[in-house]
Image (cartoon, rainbow, N blue to C red):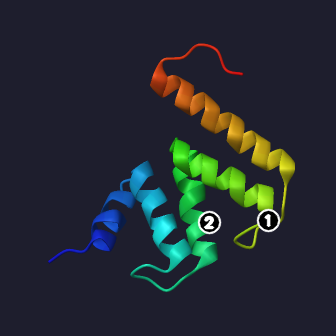
């Protein structure tokens, strides 16, 4: 019987943003896989680049705090927050962004 991990890996192979983010979460927490911050970051980064708003928010937090082996970088954190805001606005049909 296929596991969630297998489903996520299959979907991630097709660049599915949500699957990429879910894999990042699994590797970050070590759920069903060995905890691996570098792999988690890679999946979050790919998900963010593919337009996944929650992954963009996680990347903002990672860069804001200097987590997962990434140096703290307030400029990158702000850029990811802004990208996430734009992505959410697009989903909600909003035209104004703070």
Q: Looking at this view, name the residue that lies furthest to the bottom.
A: 34
Numbered disc 1: secondary structure:
loop
Question: Residue 41, which numbered label?
Answer: 2
- Foreground: 39 or 90? 90
Q: Which mark is residue 66?
A: 1
Q: Which mark is residue 19?
A: none
* Residue drawn at point x = 55 percent, y = 32 percent: 87
Q: Residue furthest top?
A: 95
Can residue 80 be seen? Answer: yes
Asked whether, in this view, residue 70 is left or right of residue 58, the answer is: right
Disc 2 packing (10 Å; few <14; some 14–19; many ≥20): many
Q: Quadrant of the N terminus?
A: bottom left
Q: Position of residue 94 (x, y in %)?
A: 54, 17
- Whole-angstrom CA distance, mark 1 to mark 2, is 12 Å
N-terminal of the two: label 1 or label 2? 2
On the picture, is 1 further left or further right than 3? left
Residue 71 relative to residue 48: left or right: right
The correct choice, above or below, for 9 with respect to 19 in the image is below
Percent x, y for residue 71?
A: 83, 65
Residue drawn at (36%, 54%), measured in percent from left and top? 14
User: Where residue 92 sits in the image (x, y, percent)?
Assistant: 47, 23
What percent of the width, then of the height, locates residue 83? 65, 36
For disc 1, the neighbor class at 10 Å (few under 14, some 14 to 19, many from 20) is some
Image quarter (top left, top right, bottom left or bottom right) of the C terminus: top right
């Amino acid at each position: 019987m296929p596991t969630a991990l297998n489903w996520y890996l299959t979907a991630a192979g097709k660049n599915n943003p949500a699957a990429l983010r879910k894999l990042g979460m699994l590797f970050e927490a070590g759920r069903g896989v060995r905890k691996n911050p570098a792999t988690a970051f890679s999946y979050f980064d790919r998900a963010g680049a593919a337009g996944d708003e929650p992954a963009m928010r996680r990347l903002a937090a990672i860069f804001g705090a200097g987590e997962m082996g990434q140096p703290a970088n307030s400029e990158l954190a702000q850029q990811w927050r802004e990208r996430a805001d734009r992505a959410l606005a697009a989903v909600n049909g909003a035209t104004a962004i703070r």
